[in-house]
């Protein structure tokens, strides 16, 4: 492993100041050191790897040498959620949850997704300036609650909004990284509000007779995710853990994807115009929209880095990560590796026009291998549907397109906001 020189360290510090994000130093070290390095921070020296070969090792071939469960706040918050468990426990929960998230079930969610999107946009007036980061979060939250738990949470937003934001803040990178035992005050009351809310939903669902239980699609006998977990006989606290996992991880990733897509369209008006023209021509699938979403995910993958604890020594061509160490695999750096991607930092959706031209495991916005994101198909379908619906319904004029920078929170978010002036568009009749 190449040692990080003082010159590289200084360049990394300058990048941190310039970009206002740890992504800057990571890019500097990747450029000057390579695909395997150790962060030179006193008290915090995790290994960082990236690139297709390393990703394959971490996610597929030697994944059993790694543990997902850490001592991080996300483990404390989600407890036994499917995201932070290992081995047979994880496999059991995942097998129970997959039927409700199977791609074959997604058509039944369409009207719910459209209805909740319209619920949010019904509050917009012509000429309003809206923040697509916040509006996207509302849409994503309402969709998760309605499709997976059978709850229309519109009237509940005032109650749960701040607790959810606090939960995301709690698991985001912070000073706890350096001082693991740092007191985290000010969160308990918000977590209690979330727990009371989720346990209340579980209690209400259990109260209803079986023949009155709502499924997510009147054409299907498949229960929604919550009902499926109840029917499986899980205890309330385990159901709560899966619900909170889907509520936090599921909505926050969708929020980031929606917000970044609008941010990038605002920065590239030519692509924005072409996309509108294509969407106006047909109500069917838009190839350019798919390309835009994939490119948004490449440049700004919501889950930009994977966090693991090494259970057994893990060997890479550049060196060995000893058992017991912390390791990150960087999706962000893999997606921007100039050895893989031509003009890696440029928004160029057409690179996805003719299928993948890069090595396997070089594009992993939803992870990969047996533990790839359980909601990947759901999230992509939601993004296509919601973005198309919004662009067909409204004109979006960017206000702060070139003042946006990435923020490493629980997901990779556009900060400080994504401001758009919205005006209603006339309804399009595709049959004319």
Image (cartoon, helix red, strand yellow):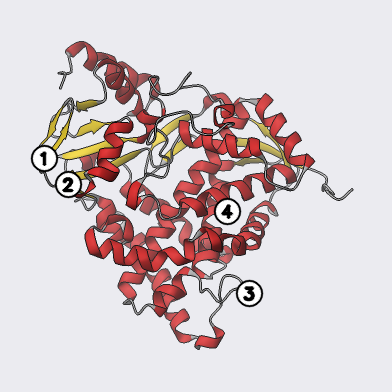
Q: Give the number of the disc on residue 313.
A: 1
Above/below status of 405 relative to 387: above
- What is the count of numbered marks? 4
Residue 398, image x, y percentages: 64, 31
Among numbered discs 4 and 2, the one appearing first in the sequence: 2
Mark 4: secondary structure: helix
Point 38% across, 32% down: residue: 332
The CA distance from mark 2 to mark 1 is: 7 Å
Q: Is residue 414 left or right of residue 400?
A: left
Mark 1: secondary structure: loop
The CA distance from mark 3 to mark 1 is: 51 Å
What residue did someone put label 4 on?
139
Q: Give the number of the disc on residue 218.
A: 3
Residue 353, image x, y percentages: 59, 31
Which mark lies nearer to you, 4 or 2? 2
Among numbered discs 2 and 1, the one appearing first in the sequence: 2
Residue 65, image x, y percentages: 17, 46
């Amino acid at each position: 492993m190449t040692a990080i020189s003082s010159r590289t360290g200084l360049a990394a510090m300058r990048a941190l100041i310039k970009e206002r994000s740890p992504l800057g130093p990571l890019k500097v070290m990747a450029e000057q050191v390579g695909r395997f390095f150790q962060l030179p921070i006193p008290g915090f020296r995790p290994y960082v790897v990236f690139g297709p070969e390393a990703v394959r090792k971490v996610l597929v071939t030697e994944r059993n040498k790694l543990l997902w469960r850490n001592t991080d706040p996300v483990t404390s918050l989600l407890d036994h959620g499917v995201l932070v468990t290992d081995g047979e426990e994880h496999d059991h929960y995942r097998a129970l949850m997959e039927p409700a998230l199977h791609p074959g079930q997604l058509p039944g969610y369409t009207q719910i997704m459209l209805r909740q999107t319209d619920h949010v946009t019904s509050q917009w007036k012509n000429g309003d300036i809206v923040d697509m980061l916040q509006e996207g979060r509302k849409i994503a939250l309402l969709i998760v609650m309605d499709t997976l738990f059978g709850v229309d949470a519109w009237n509940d937003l005032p109650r749960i909004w701040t607790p959810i934001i606090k939960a995301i803040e709690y698991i985001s990178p912070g000073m706890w990284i350096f001082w693991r035992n740092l007191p985290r005050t000010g969160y308990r009351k918000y977590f209690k509000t979330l727990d009371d809310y989720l346990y209340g939903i579980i209690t209400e669902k259990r109260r209803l007779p079986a023949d009155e239980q709502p499924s997510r699609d009147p054409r299907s006998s498949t229960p929604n995710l919550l009902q499926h977990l109840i029917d499986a006989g899980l205890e309330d606290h385990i159901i709560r853990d899966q619900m909170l996992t889907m509520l936090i991880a599921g909505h926050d990733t969708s929020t980031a994807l929606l917000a970044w897509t609008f941010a990038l369209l605002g920065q590239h008006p030519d692509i924005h115009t072409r996309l509108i023209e294509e969407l106006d021509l047909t109500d069917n699938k838009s190839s350019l929209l798919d390309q835009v979403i994939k490119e948004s995910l490449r440049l700004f993958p919501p889950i930009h880095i994977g966090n693991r604890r090494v259970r057994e020594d893990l060997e890479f061509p550049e060196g060995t990560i000893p058992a017991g160490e912390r390791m990150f695999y960087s999706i962000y750096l893999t997606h921007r590796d100039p050895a893989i991607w031509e003009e890696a930092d440029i928004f160029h959706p057409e690179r996805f026009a003719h299928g993948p031209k890069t090595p396997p495991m070089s594009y992993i916005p939803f992870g990969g291998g047996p533990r790839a994101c359980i909601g990947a198909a759901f999230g992509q379908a939601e993004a296509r549907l919601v973005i198309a619906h919004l662009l067909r319904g409204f004109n979006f004029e960017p206000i702060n397109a070139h003042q946006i920078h990435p923020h490493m929170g629980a997901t990779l978010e556009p900060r400080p906001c994504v401001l758009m002036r919205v005006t209603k568009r006339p309804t399009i009749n595709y049959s004319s």
